Image (cartoon, coloured by chain):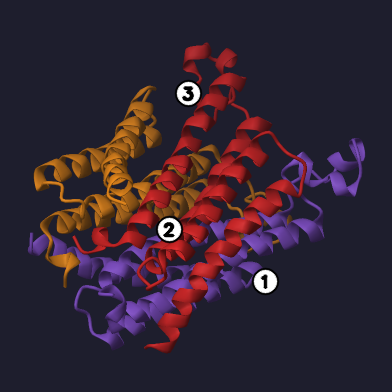
Chain colours: A orange, B purple, C red
Amino acid sequence: MHLLDHEVTMAFLRYGTILIVKMMLMSFITAFFRMRKKAFANPEDTTSFGKGENAKKYLRTDPDVERVRRIHLNDLENIVPFLFAGFFYSMSGVNLSTALLHFRIFLGSRIFHTIAYLIPLPQPSRGLAWMAGYLVTFSMLYRIIMIAFTTS
Amino acid sequence: MHLLDHEVTMAFLRYGTILIVKMMLMSFITAFFRMRKKAFANPEDTTSFGKGENAKKYLRTDPDVERVRRIHLNDLENIVPFLFAGFFYSMSGVNLSTALLHFRIFLGSRIFHTIAYLIPLPQPSRGLAWMAGYLVTFSMLYRIIMIAFTTS
Amino acid sequence: MHLLDHEVTMAFLRYGTILIVKMMLMSFITAFFRMRKKAFANPEDTTSFGKGENAKKYLRTDPDVERVRRIHLNDLENIVPFLFAGFFYSMSGVNLSTALLHFRIFLGSRIFHTIAYLIPLPQPSRGLAWMAGYLVTFSMLYRIIMIAFTTS
């Protein structure tokens, strides 16, 4: 197929799939923390821990669960723009090494962001990790905008 | 056009559009529950129910509204990865019947997930529905990864 | 490249990139409001404001911060479907002026939605802005569905 013959698109697919898998793993980590901290959002999730009032006490928010949920939402807010930008960027005639630099910094920034958020590391670790990925996405969007606004 | 001539991509588009419409309908269901339960997030949304203190009592969270909002967020967390994976999967040379099997299980899993979440059905109904869609997405990602990491 | 030679796809890219940038800016506006209102979600974000109990008081939700976060989530819920629909819509053989009408109404609706949400303007300003973008997305999805379900 056309798209899958292209080396930059293939590079995008390697990094894009890793990022999607990383984002999807946040669902598992959320479930793991909900189990470990016994903190659930739905009454039907607590029935295995008891009945009636006994189960109700597990219907609560927990700081660690909420922390993982914020990482997941932050992934959605940042990885979705990366996938949109990266897809068109990889078809923009960019050379492979420049594209790989973008993809690698973004992947590194998201993995470090998650580690810094989970442990947590003191700020500005998490903020700088987030910023690196944010700027990489803007750099890719800038190239797309330059093409889309000048060749119309 | 190139992409739209391809039968697996067309199948992906049938299931992808249904899933997007299903996800967008969650906005309507949220609005419906907010109206019915009179539970709003913004002061400006409550003014038709009274003024001042009278309106403030509708600024509250409601378990049913929060439940629908969790379904919507869960859709975002799962359908977005499916759309990314399904798009490239449909261009990976997969045969139509295998692709349809993936798309149909995913669609079924998300519809059953929403029903199980809304009613709600006892667990593990919702958990298993979620898991089915999750595994289907991983199966598609696996194929993309095999291609992207071996032909680079 | 194939996709980037096509004038409707180029138009989609102009509007799509503006919408992605607009959505990403919500992260900055959230950070700005968190700083200004001193309302943070993570203990490690408050350490520059003091230690121990003194820092804990900044671990709180603030109505304005939550408002910006709802705009960001609403963007995700609506702009992601637009990007999916718009991408395939722009390859569906639609003429440029019809496509531009869709893209422009959608962009206008999302910008007005954000303004109406931030100020906030009295309802139904925000509701109508949201509805306009919602209907535009459905109009694009309708065209894709007509093609995908009749040519299979």
Q: Amino acid at mark 1?
A: Ile
Contact? badges 1 and 3 (CB < 8 Å): no
Give the position of the C terminus of chain B as an image quadrant: bottom left
Lateral position of residue B48 relative to residue B43, left or right: right
The chain ID associated with circle 1 is B
Q: Is residue B138 above or below residue B45?
A: below
| Rendering coords of residue A8 (x, y %) | 14, 54
Q: Distance from label 1 to label 2 (Cα)?
A: 31 Å
Lateral position of residue B78 relative to residue A18, left or right: right
Residue beneath the point at 59% across and 37% down: C68
Read off the residue under disc 1: B119
The chain ID associated with circle 3 is C
Q: Is residue A120 above or below residue A49?
A: above
Read off the residue under disc 3: C45
Give the position of the N terminus of chain B as an image quadrant: bottom left
Residue beneath the point at 47% across and 43% down: C23
